[in-house]
Image (cartoon, rainbow, N blue to C red):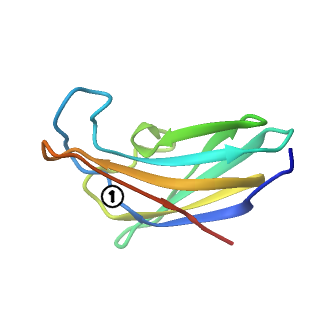
Amino acid sequence: MITLGKKTWVIAEGYIPEYGTGKEPEFTSHETACILNTSNENAEVELTIFFADKDPIGPYKVTVEAQRTKHLRFNDLKEPEPVPLGTDYACVIESSIPVVVQHTRLDSRQAENALLTTIAYSE
């Protein structure tokens, strides 16, 4: 398998709704960075969160094992501090090796759920 992707990715639009409807955790409103590592080595990944009205937070550090995918919910990021709910943000993702990143949001504030997904911007 060849190594696919880039080392730097950007999700310019982020927002985690403050609440959701339905069974948890399946229907908890959330944002996810889906990270694919096709290489034969682990990817050491750092995420930094940016805001319109305050300093960035991060880095959040995760490992994506070789030839694996990780679906990383922003709601689950706790260190150095939780990503705030109900707040616009953007995210820069930097990896030690090339990876592929896709962004997904589940908005379950209404009974009719909305799912949005897009490929992140790579540099």
55 over 4 or under it: above or below: below
Q: Nearer the viewer, residue 78 or 8?
A: 8
Instruction: Describe the element under mark 1 as helix, strand or loop.
Output: loop
Q: Residue 92 occupies which quadrant of the picture?
A: bottom right
Going 62% across and 47% down the picture, which residue do you hit? Answer: 35
Horizontal arrangement in the rendering, residue 123 relative to residue 17 (left or right): right
40 over 18 or under it: above or below: above
> Count the marks: how many?
1
Give residue 25's position: percent from left, percent from top.
32, 28
Q: How packed is label 1: few (under 14 Cα within 10 Å), some, or many (20 or more)?
A: some
Q: Which residue is mark 1?
A: 15
Going 55% across and 58% down the picture, which residue do you hit? Answer: 48
Q: Nearer the viewer, residue 24 or 3?
A: 3
Give residue 33's position: percent from left, percent from top.
52, 49
Q: Quadrant of the C terminus?
A: bottom right
Give residue 62's position: percent from left, percent from top.
64, 40
Going 85% across and 39% down the picture, which residue do you hit? Answer: 41
Give residue 93's position: percent from left, percent from top.
61, 58
Horizontal arrangement in the rendering, residue 60 relative to residue 12 (left or right): right
Horizontal arrangement in the rendering, residue 57 relative to residue 122 (left or right): left
Q: Residue furthest left?
A: 111
Going 13% across and 42% down the picture, which residue do you hit? Answer: 111
Q: Quadrant of the N terminus?
A: top right
Q: Residue 27 occupies which quadrant of the picture?
A: top left
105 over 118 or under it: above or below: above
Q: Amino acid at mark 1?
A: Tyr
